[in-house]
Image (cartoon, grey):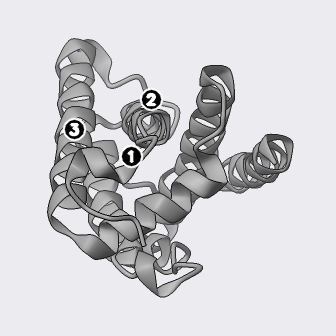
Amino acid sequence: MVRVIVIFYFVLGGFGLGLIALRVDAESAFDPFGSGGGQWPYFTAVALVAIAVVHFGSVLAIRYSRSLARTVDEMRQWLGGLSRSEVLAVALASGVAEELFFRGWLLNEVGLIASSVIFGLVHVPPTRNWMYWPVFAFIVGLFLGALCIWSDSLIYAIIVHAGINFINILRLPPELKKFGVAGK
């Protein structure tokens, strides 16, 4: 399963890179390959704080929402048995590829709001338990797009996206009892 996920994201990332390359002379909201200039420590700190806020917010949301707890239970069935290196591979692949495509290319094509809406729509859930997912993806998409524009770089959005995915997949609880809710 990990190979399929990584291959999918490899293709998406390559597609995103190709589309970015086609925009070379086009006007852009930010430089996808920019470094953020001399403010890299500041933007790195912003990225790390964002990862922590989303992770701890997720922990609290799971604790108080039966629907989210069921979502975690389903997600654990799909991704809960991955090794640390497999989780890292999935997190990096998804973070890099989705950011190349959605922020690196699409944000510069259609703007912040539209790219965030599309990002939310592609996160339509496989089951009703995941109905919060598109809303969460839209909000995170807004933040990641704003971070790209603000920092004039894609790297910090990649760090946030991969970091959120890594921690949340890695910390899929072995059982939901520790959150005080039943899984199903």
- Cα separation between marks 3 and 1: 20 Å
Q: Nearer the viewer, mark 3 or mark 2?
A: 3
How crowded is the residue under tag 1: few (<14 C-alpha within 10 Å), some, or many (20+)?
Answer: many
Q: Quadrant of residue 112?
A: bottom left
Where residue 137 sits: x, y (%)?
38, 66
Calculate the distance from the C-alpha at mark 1 to the C-alpha at mark 2.
8 Å
Considering only vertical position in the picture, is 60 above or below 123? Answer: above
Quadrant containing the C terminus is: bottom left
Picture residue at 21% right of the left edge, 33% below the top: 52
* Front in this rendered view, residue 122 or 19: 122
Instruction: Please tell me which residue lies in front, 178 or 156.
Output: 178
User: Is the C-beta separation of discs 3 and 1 under 8 Å?
Assistant: no
Q: Quadrant of residue 151?
A: top left
CB atoms of marks 1 and 2 within 8 Å: yes
Q: Dot 2: within a 10 Å radius of its alpha carbon, few (fewer than 14), some, or many (20 or more) residues?
A: few
Residue at 38 percent of width and 40 percent of height: 164
Of the numbered discs 3 and 2, the one sitting upstream in the chain is 2
**Which secondary structure, mark 1?**
loop
The residue at 53%/58% (across/down) is 75
Q: What is the secondary structure assignment of the residue under circle 2?
A: loop
Q: Position of residue 58 (x, y in %)?
A: 25, 51
When the figure is inspected, residue 139 is found, relative to residue 152, above or below; the finding is: below
Q: Which residue is mark 1?
A: 30
Which of marks 1 and 3 precedes in the sequence? 1
Type of amino acid at the residue the image marks with label 2: Gly
Whole-angstrom CA distance, mark 3 to mark 2, is 20 Å
Q: Which residue is mark 3?
A: 50
The amino acid on which the numbered mark 1 sits, given as a three-letter code, is Phe
Report helix, strand or loop for mark 3. Answer: helix
Percent position of residue 84, x then y: 60, 22
Judging by the rendered image, the residue that carries numbered circle 2 is 34
